[in-house]
């Protein structure tokens, strides 16, 4: 009888102590904001205006950068290579702009995904550039293209110039 009471007590104690230890369901993350829709493609005149504004921002840091402006499909509309900028910056700027246009979001978003352990981002598209410096150009709530900047010591400096270029058309 004593053994039965002790066994029953142990079972009850175990249920009381372990009863609250249930797996917690993780909170469902909020849905990301819907990106803007595509609009009419950027014109050559608009592309040149964006490049001039981006260059003005780069000149504040005395940097010679390359700027690529693409239409919403990622097709190159305008390329401006700074005197003395590295040769690879042309392809990198085009890749950043293409990424921003096709995905309707800054190329830095993909860098952030890679840095946070979401390496699948690299498998989305063989031309995707996961580096800061590509920014969609949004006019009247529609993506008309994107600008990519390359050649600075860090992608964040490229991003500042590209952001200034995109803002020139708002």
Image (tube, rainbow, N blue to C red):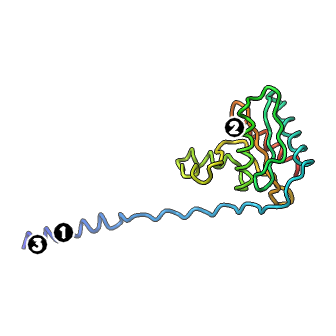
Q: Nearer the viewer, residue 157 or 68?
A: 68
- Under circle 2, the secondary element is helix
Disc 3 from disc 2: Cα separation? 71 Å
Name the side, left or right, on which 21 lies relative to 10: right
First along the sequence among labels 3 and 2: 3
Q: Residue at x 89, y 39 (%)?
A: 52
Image coordinates for residue 21, horizontal then vertical, percent = 35, 63
Q: Nearer the viewer, residue 4 or 155?
A: 155
Q: Residue at x 20, y 69 (%)?
A: 11
- Under circle 1, the secondary element is helix
Looking at the picture, does residue 18 appear above or below residue 126?
below
Image coordinates for residue 113, horizontal then vertical, percent = 59, 49
- Under circle 3, the secondary element is helix
Tag shown at residue 155: 2
Looking at the picture, does residue 133 appear above or below residue 87?
below
Q: Residue at x 79, y 61 (%)?
A: 38
From the image, tell me which residue sits under label 1. 9
From the image, tell me which residue sits under label 3. 4
């Amino acid at each position: 009888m004593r053994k039965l009471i002790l066994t029953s007590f142990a079972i009850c104690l175990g249920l009381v102590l372990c009863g609250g230890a249930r797996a917690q369901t993780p909170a469902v993350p909020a849905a990301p904001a819907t990106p803007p829709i595509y609009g009419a493609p950027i014109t050559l005149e608009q592309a040149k205006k964006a490049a001039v504004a981006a260059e003005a921002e780069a000149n504040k840091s005395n940097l010679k950068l390359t700027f690529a402006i693409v239409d919403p499909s990622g097709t190159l509309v305008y390329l401006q290579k700074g005197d003395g900028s590295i040769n690879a910056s042309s392809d990198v700027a085009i890749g950043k702009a293409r990424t921003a246009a096709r995905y309707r979001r800054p190329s830095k978003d993909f860098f952030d995904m890679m840095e946070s352990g979401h390496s699948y981002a690299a498998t989305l598209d063989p031309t995707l550039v996961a580096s800061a410096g590509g920014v969609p150009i949004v006019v009247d709530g529609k993506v008309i293209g994107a600008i990519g900047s390359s050649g600075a010591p860090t992608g964040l400096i490229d991003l500042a110039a590209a952001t200034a270029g995109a803002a020139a058309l708002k």
